[in-house]
Image (cartoon, rainbow, N blue to C red):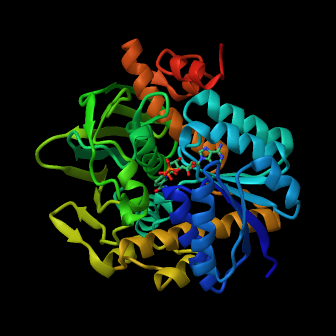
Amino acid sequence: MERIPIAIVGCGGMGRRHLTGVAALYRSDFRNVDLVAVCDINAQNASDLADEAAQQLGQRPRVFTSLPEMVQAMPEIRGVDVPTDVASHHLVAGACLDAGLNVQCEKPMALTLRGCNAILEAARRNGKILSVAENFRRDPINRLARALIADGAIGTPQLMVETSIGGANRMIITPWRHLKLKGTVVLDVGVHNADIMHYYLGEPVSIFGEGRLYEPRRLKGDASGPGGFYRKWADNVPEVIEATGEDALFGYVRFASGAIGQWIQHHAGHGQPRHARVVYGSKGSLTCPGDRNGRPLKLHLDGGQEISGEDILAHAPSYRLSPLAAELFGGERVWTYEFPFPETDAKILALEYYELGECIRTGQSPEVTGEVARRDVAMVYAALESGRLGRPVSIAEVEAVAVDDYQREIDQHLGLIS
Ligand SMILES: NC(=O)c1ccc[n+]([C@@H]2O[C@H](COP(=O)([O-])OP(=O)(O)OC[C@H]3O[C@@H](n4cnc5c(N)ncnc54)[C@H](O)[C@@H]3O)[C@@H](O)[C@H]2O)c1
């Protein structure tokens, strides 16, 4: 198979995780990319990732600290993966697209809607592929949940309850996740949950909601991050920071189908943590276990019937994983799996890289296009802008930046408006 030369730009925690995805794809029967370069403005991070790549891939990519230098030195690069921190996405992804490269950008697509729109315009202007690395929906359990809903297992969807509560006053990995001008946790984490609601129930139309900042002082938490990928930077994380970004978001979501979403992202929750994802329909309900844990779904039908385990597959006749996902997860109709987190994470990231390679090879469109990913970002900001205006806010007005009271300060800071 033709292998597309690609580069990783952004060699922090997620860059390290992405490398494990490249390695999982290399080990599969579907390898369609070659990692030929890594780039980061932090020279140490770039060179460390190249060392890790040499170990995991058997080949050391070239190291750059400047994107223009990389583009000039290696014109063979056709795709760039951008796991830089969110405040830089519009600049880095935009520069890659303007340099004629195809781009996979980490979620959230950008820090504000103006940032998303700038990236979308760059992709259109240059006629290049723009894919956003939204990984949760690629979890086989989320694929199965969506197929169950689409195949009518719960009847007509009426209500989705999406709840994440916990965190108290501990920092979520890095300080930037608590700083309004760099990326709030309600955006950084909330965009995943927004995407899952969007993936399960279709287009959101409007949101009535609000954001809160409950914990203005955040204390150092588990700075080693999921899977320990941030451990090498943990000593640099201060013991306490002054948080400026919202740490809770509450929303009432209306979908085009008529379904309603009750959305809670409470990352300052004390006491008992709570994570719940349940979809209720006209025939039954679907209880989902969360993301990347491989636990089975539960279907409850009228009359008290509970269906879980392999039997649930009978209610999702359309469910089929892609050939690569089937190879990585052990079958095309997987209903549960058990791998350590870093392994599951790598398998899902491998799916993203494979899709990027195929989009470049064949011209096919990615699953999470810039438009899809912008809608996920718009869901978060619809809730925050709604809180400022005291009324429901439509997704359309957020995407068109017809409401921006909350975001103006960030856009000014980013230089997107004066
Ligand atoms: N999908 C997921 O499950 C998941 C999980 C964690 C993080 N993320 C996303 O990944 C992205 C990165 O997060 P992180 O936790 O790795 O952040 P991080 O702070 O650990 O790393 C960011 C890296 O980007 C580099 N960088 C910044 N600006 C740059 C530029 N202009 N050019 C080149 N390099 C630049 C920094 O030097 C740093 O090495 C964010 O968008 C975040 O939301 C996604």
Left or right of residue 25: residue 277: left
Q: Quadrant of residue 417?
A: top right
Residue 292, given in percent of the width and then of the height, sits at: 38, 66
Residue 265 % position (x, y): 31, 40
Question: Position of 34 compared to 246: left or right?
Answer: right
The structure residue drawn at horizontal position 58% and vertical position 57%, both measured from the top left corner, is 44
Q: Quadrant of residue 248?
A: top left
Can residue 291 be seen from the camera position used here? no
Closer-to-camera residue (35/272): 35
Q: Position of residue 170 (x, y in %)?
A: 25, 43
Residue in the picture at 55% in, 41% down: 86
Which residue lies most toward the left here? 271
**In the displayed structure, does residue 114 sit left or right of residue 178?**
right
* Residue drawn where x is 59% and y is 17% of the image: 402
18 relative position to 234: left or right: right
- Image x and y of residue 73, in percent: 86, 58
